[in-house]
Image: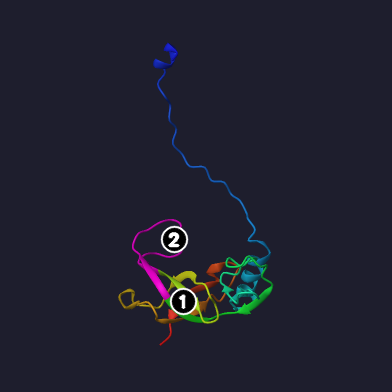
Amino acid sequence: MNKWLETVKPLVYESRIKVPYTWSVGEVGSRFLIALRDHKKIYGTRCAKCDRVYLPPRKTCGNCFSTLHEWVEVGPKGTLITYTTVHYTSSVMPMKPSFAYGIILLDKASTGLVHLLGEVNLEEIKPEMRVEAVFKDERIGDILDIRYFKPIK
């Protein structure tokens, strides 16, 4: 090793770089989000070969690798499969803690959708409870156009 490196003190500059960007959710994701925004409808894609309905929708079946063409309305009601409660603050969280996320199996879907739970006492959440989507009044075309899923009473 060169001797001159031994006399050099490393300089460390700590900062954050913001890189603004846009991205596309593609043909399938766009159709899904537009239906949320414009019609308050939740759609999945159904495989003609193995009859699985994917939510969020996808272009290819994960079971048999067929191309998916059929769109099926799956919402707005479903069953909470599992959940977790968030108790910490982060700039990326969609709401202030404490709140819960759940995996919701909508009635006509074969796969679960991860989303927020609302209008619920965190102590009373339990798997198998029935829930339904609550949409924002002003929707912009993203997954949070579904504000949350609330218990069906």
Instruction: Please tell me in which quadrant of the rendered image residue 82 appears.
Output: bottom left
Q: Nearer the viewer, mark 2 or mark 1?
A: 1
Q: Is residue 12 above or below residue 75?
A: above
Image point (42%, 18%), residue name: 8
How far across and down, in percent of the image, does residue 4 sit?
Answer: 44, 12
Which residue appears farthest toward the bottom when viewing the image?
Answer: 153
How far across and down, in percent of the image, does residue 80 sit?
Answer: 43, 77
Count of labels shown? Answer: 2
Q: Is 83 one of the magenta-colored residues? A: yes
Q: Which residues are magenta?
A: 81-100
Image point (58%, 75%), residue name: 53
Instruction: Inspect the image, locate mark 1, and give the three-letter code of the amino acid beneath it.
Output: Phe
* Residues at marks 2 and 1, CA–CA distance in whole angstroms: 16 Å
Question: Which residue is denoted by mark 2 in the rendering?
Answer: 93
User: Residue 55: in sight, yes or no?
Assistant: yes
Classify 10 Å Cα crowding around label 2: few (below 14), some (14-19), many (20 and above). few
Q: Is residue 153 above or below residue 127?
A: below
Query: Horizontal placement of 41 versus 94: left or right?
Result: right
Q: Specify which label sits upstream in the sequence, 2 or 1.
A: 2
Q: Is residue 14 above or below residue 34?
A: above
Which secondary structure, mark 2?
loop
Question: Which residue is denoted by mark 1 in the rendering?
Answer: 149
Split into 4 quadrants, where in the image is the N terminus?
top left
Query: Horizontal placement of 24 versus 123: left or right?
Result: right
Classify 10 Å Cα crowding around label 1: few (below 14), some (14-19), many (20 and above). many
How far across and down, in percent of the image, does residue 26 sit?
Answer: 66, 61
Query: Horizontal placement of 75 versus 27: left or right?
Result: left
